[in-house]
Image (tube, rainbow, N blue to C red):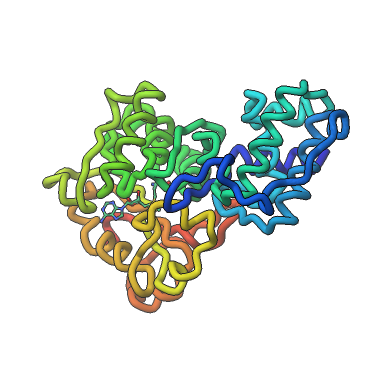
Amino acid sequence: MAKTTKAKRAAKRGAAAAKPPAKRSAAKLAPRARLPKVAPGELVTLLDFLRYAVSRFAEAGVVFAHGTTDPIAEAAFLIGEALHLHPDQFEMFASARVTAPEGAKILDLIERRVATRLPAAYLINKIYMRGVPFYVDERVIVPRSFIGELLDSHFDGGETSLIGDPAEVERVLDLCTGSGCLAILAARAFPFAAIDAVDLSKDALAVAARNVADHQLGDRITLHNGDLFAPLGDARYDLIITNPPYVDAEGMANLPAECRAEPAMAFDGGDDGLDIVRRILAEAKDHLTETGGLLCEIGRGRGLIDAEFPDLPLLWLDSEDSEGEVFWIAAADL
Ligand SMILES: C[S@@+](CC[C@H](N)C(=O)[O-])C[C@H]1O[C@@H](n2cnc3c(N)ncnc32)[C@H](O)[C@@H]1O
């Protein structure tokens, strides 16, 4: 069952998403966007529905850019959610039959995904990141940062860890928090840390507030509205994590439909994509403790950054699905 294992892994990392400029309901879909009718009994098991969804997604050319990276993972995520199953449970139930109402619900989701091009996460208002569920809607980008994985792999106090004991991390800053996903994962990774999380978008912070409440972290995570470090005064942190907007002008002009459904300000990093990254690099030192460090995702801009800051000893980190899209730098080296 390699495929469903892959689906499970990818769905665990996150999931699909997209939001249109204005909401479109299934009732308003153009007839040509409708999927062919499935006769009763043609699709029986979860795996049958998975196969059907994958075929429809491939036929429609939908894009997978929101945590799930392929049609199998996307389909497993949607089907699992329709049936109230955690992504981890898909494989266990792959050969189980679905009831007629469940089947209708799954087919409706598949049709809406194809017709609206909305990311799956917006259709069901949920995404998993590192197996942790987050509420999302069209006010925030769908979480898919590589930093979630890196917190587990490089900040656990183990052999390859970039920090000592995670229990000794006292203050963390999540810049550009969006849905609050990284702040919440950081709260789990650093059990005694107080966390500040900043976003310029009030809409995004409303979603973050909901997630912080859902995860009962209101006593540890403080949300701030403002421009990067501006709302923080002279506070200093042991760790700054950030997944800022970093799409360049060409990328913005060519965003797939699924990404155009997300807030543009979550992507737009200026002409070469690095406007905000440069500001973070310039200002981070003033907000780090002496032994602190900055973990920053920048997408594919490594060449530009290396060329512009040849003297900065940036440590480029890889994750399961990325190479050199996130750097770490100690405060002492900034
Ligand atoms: C790529 S999203 C990351 C969201 C979240 N951290 C994640 O990984 O899913 C970037 C976020 O930065 C916010 N943002 C854009 N410009 C900003 C600024 N100047 N100061 C603070 N936040 C900003 C956007 O509203 C968006 O929520």
Image: 268 above or below 163: below
The image position of residue 74, as x and y in percent, is 65, 44
Image: 288 above or below 76: below
- The quadrant of the rendering that contains the N terminus is top right
Residue 197: image quadrant is: top left
The image position of residue 118, as x and y in percent, is 54, 48
> Residue shown at 32%/31% (left/top)?
209
> How many discs appear?
0
> Residue shown at 42%/65% (left/top)?
247
- The quadrant of the rendering that contains the C terminus is bottom left
Could you tell whether 317 is left or right of 49 in the image?
left
Of residues 257 and 180, the one nearer the viewer is 257
The image position of residue 97, as x and y in percent, is 82, 23
Does residue 305 appear in this view? no
Could you tell whether 279 is left or right of 266 in the image?
left
> Residue shown at 24%/56% (left/top)?
284
> Residue shown at 53%/46% (left/top)?
17
The image position of residue 268, as x and y in percent, is 36, 63
Of residues 109 and 65, the one nearer the viewer is 109
Residue 332: image quadrant is: bottom left
Could you tell whether 21 is left or right of 4 in the image?
left
